């Protein structure tokens, strides 16, 4: 059942959203991307004449900790929604029930942090049942937690045999990943960066069965370079994964995948923005120096492949983009993906650091889809069953 095919008039609708947003020392929201992403689903229910009950977690509290209270995000939610909301300092119990019962049609209620109860993460059935008793209908629109079998993301769905669906955000996430992995459009290019090969093995192996081009950058590239006999100086390396890197290179050849590694790198004599730098071939890094970004020739090589692509998946930066001296590679990839998208390619960006880079350079509107769930997106691409998705599909 799709959300567009449902009329929520006179229904009490509990929506699992992902409002796990960053806060500064004064408890101000510093990035409202996830709140913005949930707004279309909330507005649909309001417009139909339903009552919205929002539930989410925030951070990793140990019991009831005020600094993790969702009360801190109320004004930001109201600002994005353009409506006032009613905050309740709990998520289950009589007080919550009475607030909901006294609410008018079209009103929005935000419940307190679900993780103030240990039962949420434990996937406790009784806790999920208490949440389900607050509403007639359940919507899951929290893709960022869809890979967790928590009470509010998976267990609660069993109390709604038919009255449940995905929100617009999860619908879009699923469509975007399926488009990248199952489309017949070619060529498909995946760009995988970040620090470690070990954290990306499963996704790389899955992509080798699907993609035409696989670009590898970031810290993990140096493990591939060393595996092939290159000199990488003091660069980040996972010596336990050298053999695996060679196997990945072999599998790429066998599957006729064009595997691109950086050919040059910006090296530094210290891990800081003020360090001395130079550009060298990636397999000729002197001792005492470390690679912290891809070089100009690598940027050109990768850009040419990206611009020739019809489908693009990007996960992980090309260097230490948080430091200005080592952000050019990541900026170049981001701008090139935006340019390819403008020319008609479909681009999906996911994974915390890639999303942070896209947001930092204000390119979110210039790619096809920015995933709100890094871990969930990667697990979905890897072919794993996500409990929050399966619970709605009754799998």
Image (spheres, rainbow, N blue to C red):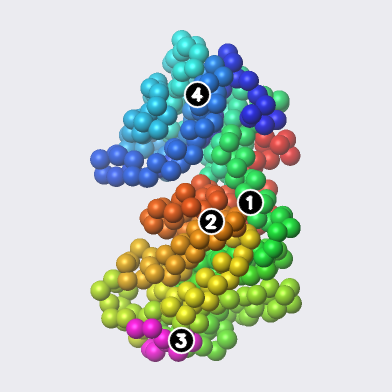
Q: Residues within 10 Å of mark 3 (few under 14, many from 20)?
A: some
Q: Do labels 3 and 1 touch, CB within 8 Å?
A: no
Q: Which residue is mark 2?
A: 342
Q: CA distance from mark 1 to mark 4?
A: 28 Å
Position in image of residue 30 (x %, y %): 33, 44
The first of marks 4 and 2 along the sequence is 4
Q: CA distance from mark 4 to mark 3?
A: 56 Å
Element marked by disc 1: helix
User: Can you tell which of label 4 and label 2 is closer to the viewer?
Assistant: 2
Q: Which residues are magenta?
A: 278-287
Residue at image point 45% right, 89% down: 284
Q: Residues within 10 Å of mark 2 (few under 14, many from 20)?
A: some
Labelled disc at residue 53: 4
Q: CA distance from mark 2 to mark 3?
A: 32 Å
* Magenta highlight on residue 229: no
* Magenta highlight on residue 281: yes
**Which image quarter is the C terminus in?**
top right
| Vertical comparison of 82 with 327: above or below | above
| Vertical comparison of 335 with 97: above or below | below
The first of marks 2 and 1 along the sequence is 1
Q: CA distance from mark 3 to mark 1?
A: 35 Å
User: Can you tell which of label 2 and label 3 is closer to the viewer?
Assistant: 2
Q: CA distance from mark 4 to mark 2?
A: 38 Å
In this view, the residue in front, 95 or 268, is 268
Task: Kindly tell me whether residue 170 is visible in this rendering.
Answer: yes
Q: Which residue is mark 1?
A: 177
Element marked by disc 4: strand
């Amino acid at each position: 059942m799709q959300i567009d095919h449902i009329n929520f008039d006179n229904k009490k609708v509990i929506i699992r959203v992902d409002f796990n947003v960053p806060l500064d020392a004064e408890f101000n929201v510093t990035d409202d991307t996830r709140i913005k992403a949930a707004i279309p689903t909330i507005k649909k229910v309001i417009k139909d004449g339903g009552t919205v009950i929002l539930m989410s977690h925030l951070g990793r509290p140990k019991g009831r900790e005020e600094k993790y209270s969702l009360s801190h995000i109320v004004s930001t939610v109201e600002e994005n929604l353009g409506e006032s909301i009613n905050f309740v300092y709990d998520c289950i119990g009589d007080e919550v029930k009475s607030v909901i019962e006294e609410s008018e049609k079209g009103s929005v209620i935000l419940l307190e942090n679900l993780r103030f109860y240990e039962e949420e993460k434990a996937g406790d059935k009784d806790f999920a049942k208490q949440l389900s008793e607050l509403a007639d209908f359940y919507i899951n629109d929290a893709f960022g937690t869809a890979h967790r079998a928590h009470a509010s993301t998976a267990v609660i769905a069993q109390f709604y045999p038919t009255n449940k669906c995905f929100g617009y955000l999860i619908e879009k996430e699923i469509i975007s990943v399926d488009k990248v992995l199952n489309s017949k459009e070619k060529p498909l290019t995946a760009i995988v960066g970040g620090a470690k090969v070990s954290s990306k093995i499963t996704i790389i192996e899955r992509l080798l069965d699907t993609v035409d081009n696989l670009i590898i950058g970031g810290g993990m590239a140096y493990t591939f370079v060393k595996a092939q006999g290159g000199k990488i100086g003091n660069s980040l390396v996972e010596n336990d994964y050298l053999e695996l890197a060679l196997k990945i290179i072999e599998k790429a050849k066998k599957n006729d995948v064009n595997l691109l590694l950086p050919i040059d790198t910006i090296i530094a004599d210290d891990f800081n923005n003020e360090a001395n730098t130079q550009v060298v071939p990636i397999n000729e890094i002197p001792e005492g120096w470390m690679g912290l970004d891809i070089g100009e020739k690598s940027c050109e090589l990768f850009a040419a492949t990206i611009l020739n692509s019809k489908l693009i998946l990007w996960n992980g930066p090309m260097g230490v983009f948080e430091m200005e001296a080592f952000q050019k590679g990541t900026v170049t990839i981001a701008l090139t993906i935006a340019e390819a998208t403008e020319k008609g390619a479909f681009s999906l960006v996911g994974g915390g650091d890639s999303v942070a880079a896209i947001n930092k350079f204000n390119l979110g509107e210039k790619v096809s889809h920015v995933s709100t769930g890094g871990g969930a997106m990667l697990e979905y691409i890897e072919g794993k069953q996500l409990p929050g998705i399966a619970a709605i599909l009754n799998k």
